[in-house]
Image (cartoon, grey):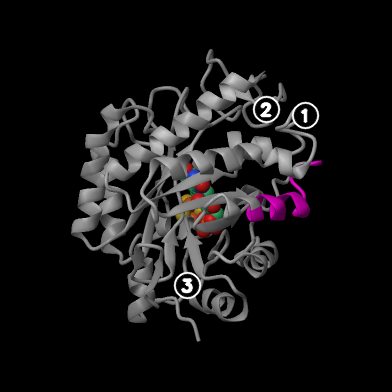
Amino acid sequence: MKSLYDETSIGSLKLRNRVFRAAIGDVDGTDGYYSETDLARYRELADGNIGLIITGEADVSDYQLFEGGKSISIQDDRYIDSLKRLTGMIHERGGKMMIQLVHYGAETFMQGVDLIAPSDVPYPFTKQKPRPMTLDDISRVVSDFGRAARRAEIAGFDGIELHAGHGFLISEFLSPCFNLRADQYGGNDENRARLLVEVLTEIRKNVSEDYPVFVKLNCTDGFENGISEQGFLTACRLAEKAGASLLEVSGDWLNHKEKTPYFLEATSKCAEELHIPVALVGGVRDINTAENVLNNTKIEYISMARPFINDPYLLKKWMSGEADKSDCRNCNACTRTGLKCPFRK
Ligand SMILES: Cc1cc2nc3c(=O)[nH]c(=O)nc-3n(C[C@H](O)[C@H](O)[C@H](O)COP(=O)(O)O)c2cc1C
Ligand code: SF4
């Protein structure tokens, strides 16, 4: 029998339980650096006994998500000292932490930037028309991911998570509705996964041998002619081959309101096919569901985001028997209020 509270290892990474705090954008930064408000939020999470905390997206190059440098950056060595402060604080509290690396592609709200993407298809939420990437752009961005991964290891993160989901650059390449390319990066599932594979290969060259490298990707993106099940499974297989240590399977989570896991079927199928561990994210709200997933599928880890905005100490309460579910209502107010939950415990 698997339990949420089993100690496990992924390569060199030893985890105190099977629960991840899924990435949540860090919105209180200044010029791409963590602020005291961000650090205070992480202090609570570390004290809440979570097995692994994954930071919000950190951009590896070019531009951020919003104007004003409020999200986190890792595109230069000058960020390393501030990142070390964060990892030091988490480690002092017995926690483990990964940083999520991203290139925003066409999905940024910043104006007047040289927006790059696989093709000139505007991202529906941000609506700006990107410039199709040249082969030189692609090889530069691949190198940027490698350099960012090296900085993450120097800064003391226990691993990195490559963001290949949620409509950002790598997921735009994976998705036929954003990738209309006729070269070696488009036209079929293998070609659409080429950027993911090249980035993983470059990251592996820049970090220690068994440094954990997770990949978060979509099993569906909710758009007509978006990523297919076959495209998703091909990307998973190729990511495993290119050195991913774990896959966290996500999708169009904003389109869902259920209080049960949104992507269980696809995540379970992925876990059946792969040899590396797989994590479920999206809609997990109670212990029973989480432990049923662990015991009735090959899924090894449970990742939650909004339940820890609602209550950073939720897992501690689950472990002590004080609670057995999350009170998160899936209302998404926290996506508009700088991570403040009106129903916070
Ligand atoms: C405010 C907010 C910010 C988020 N930021 C990120 C992010 O930076 N990177 C990411 O991969 N997912 C991000 N997500 C998505 C979550 O990681 C997770 O996939 C999604 O919320 C579904 O999980 P849940 O039902 O447990 O909340 C964010 C979600 C919320 C609510
Ligand atoms: S604001 Fe809504 S979605 Fe966000 S954590 Fe609170 S209850 Fe959950």
User: Does the rendering let one see residue 331?
Assistant: no
- Pick whichever of labels 2 and 1 is earlier in the sequence: 2
In the rendered structure, are the residues bearing label 1 and label 3 in contact, judged by CB atoms less than 8 Å apart?
no
What's the residue at 34%, 42% (across, down)?
A: 152
Residue 229 in magenta stretch: yes
User: Does the rendering let one see residue 239?
Assistant: yes
Q: How many marks?
A: 3
Q: Residue farthest to the top?
A: 112
In the rendered structure, are the residues bearing label 2 and label 1 in contact, judged by CB atoms less than 8 Å apart?
yes
x and y, in percent, of residue 263 in the image: 65, 61
x and y, in percent, of residue 251 in the image: 64, 51
What residue is pinned by disc 2? 118
**Nearer to me, 53 or 39:** 53
Give the amino acid type for the residue marked by disc 1 in the picture. Leu
- Measured in 3D between alpha carbons, the distance from the residue under mark 3 to the one under mark 2, in whole angstroms, is 41 Å
**Nearer to me, 335 or 21:** 21
Give the numbered dot on residue 325: 3
Relative height, residue 174 to residue 324 (above, below)? above
x and y, in percent, of residue 154 in the image: 28, 42
Q: Magenta-highlighted stretch: main secondary structure? A: helix
Secondary element under disc 1, as helix, strand or loop, is loop
Give, as a single range, the part of the protein colored magenta.
224-237
Give the numbered dot on residue 180: 1
Give the amino acid type for the residue marked by disc 2 in the picture. Pro
Relative height, residue 147 to residue 128 (above, below)? below
Secondary element under disc 2, as helix, strand or loop, is loop
Relative height, residue 324 to residue 118 (above, below)? below
- Pick whichever of labels 1 and 3 is earlier in the sequence: 1
| Mark 3 within 8 Å of ligand 2, using the beta carbon | no
- Measured in 3D between alpha carbons, the distance from the residue under mark 2 to the one under mark 1, in whole angstroms, is 7 Å
Relative height, residue 133 to residue 84 (above, below)? above
x and y, in percent, of residue 324 in the image: 45, 77
